[in-house]
Amino acid sequence: MGFKVAVVGATGNVGREMLSVLVERGFPADEVVALASRRSQGTEVSFGDKTLKVKFLDTYDFSDTDICLMSAGGAVSKEWSPKIGAAGCVVIDNSSAWRYDSNVPLIVPEVNADAVVGFRAKNIIANPNCSTAQLVVALKPLHDAATIKRVVVATYQSVSGAGKEGMDELFTQTRAVFVTDPITSRKFTKRIAFNVIPHIDVFMEDGSTKEEWKMMAETKKILDPKIKLVATAVRVPVFIGHSEAVNIEFERAISADEARDILRESPGVLVIDKHEDGGYITPVEAAGEDATYVSRIREDATVEHGLSMWVVSDNLRKGAALNAVQIAELLVNRRLIKPKRQAA
């Protein structure tokens, strides 16, 4: 008998992607339930060749549900995840609500799968920030080979990271430019069409934004607390796909050719790195794909053991929905959970 899975926030960008990924990967679910807020109750969402009617989260009984994929924002997760966990359902949460809780594992399966056993403390597992997920997938095998000391990263993050409202704003503003309509900014702090905005999330006391802090804190928790990381997070006029320019300083020597060979053999990574026109990946090619793509691998002569590279991934998939489903697969494959109905 298979598992019963609930997807909370099923009408959002990531929630819909979670439903798609469950089907694509053949997750062993006998039943999948779509949940959202009252205003979305009754909305229909696609699940493979089926259509699911969205149910109201507040009145749903989780007592016979095995896994909850939560993608409804931090406030909803803070309120509901402990209740759902207490009902014996494992929550895999896509928000930032639980990432920094020492009793909640923060998991990228290709990087720190063994840490998943810590979920039993609260029955909650955290999904990392989208920009962090793809970064650590690329960093992990290089860290194992030569030990990373310091990372400097500049992100080029798509508007889908800000949800459907962000995508709508880019579309509306782009159209307004061509038809000379007035341009209004509601979701972003400045115009996003034909522009870049070095500001994601709120500003912190040291001048960093919360998005930049997240990358630092999450990389330390997932990969190694000794790694020093500084980020500049930038929103760009791209619909789907986050890109990152990554500079890495290592403790030991590692050449570009060695790094390329290591990454080619690494789980979740695809290397596309030809020194020719178009011999690299852009967000357009990465959209809809599962891999974290690495291009432009080269040595940095300004530090003793340095490399630079270009990392691109679909933020709705590896940065969110895919990673969450991979965590669920990890629980199943390691037999850390069993279907409640089978146990009964």
Image (tube, rainbow, N blue to C red):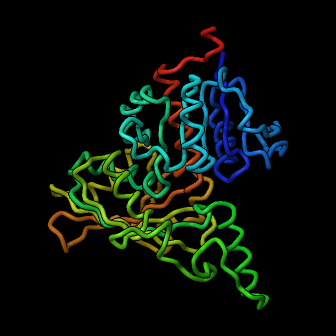
- Look at the image and tell me whether residue 310 can be seen: yes
Coordinates of residue 230 in the picture (x, y in percent): 31, 65
Q: In which image quadrant can residue 309 be found?
A: bottom left
Q: Left or right? Give the position of 298 relative to 118.
A: left
Query: In percent of the image, x 72 and y 43: which residue is there?
Result: 36
User: Relative to the observer, which residue lies in front, 111 or 184?
Assistant: 184
Q: Quadrant of the N terminus?
A: top right
Residue furthest top as drawn: 344
Q: In which image quadrant can residue 117 be found?
A: top left
Q: Quadrant of the C terminus?
A: top right
Query: In percent of the image, x 67 and y 53: which residue is there?
Result: 13
Query: In percent of the image, x 69 and y 43: which residue is there?
Result: 20
Residue furthest bottom as drawn: 180
Q: Is residue 45 above or below residue 132?
A: above
Coordinates of residue 212 in the picture (x, y in percent): 40, 64
User: Relative to the observer, which residue lies in front, 127 or 123?
Assistant: 123
Q: Number of marks in the image?
A: 0
- Look at the image and tell me whether residue 154 can be seen: no
Coordinates of residue 269 in the picture (x, y in percent): 44, 49
Q: Left or right? Give the position of 321 relative to 202.
A: right
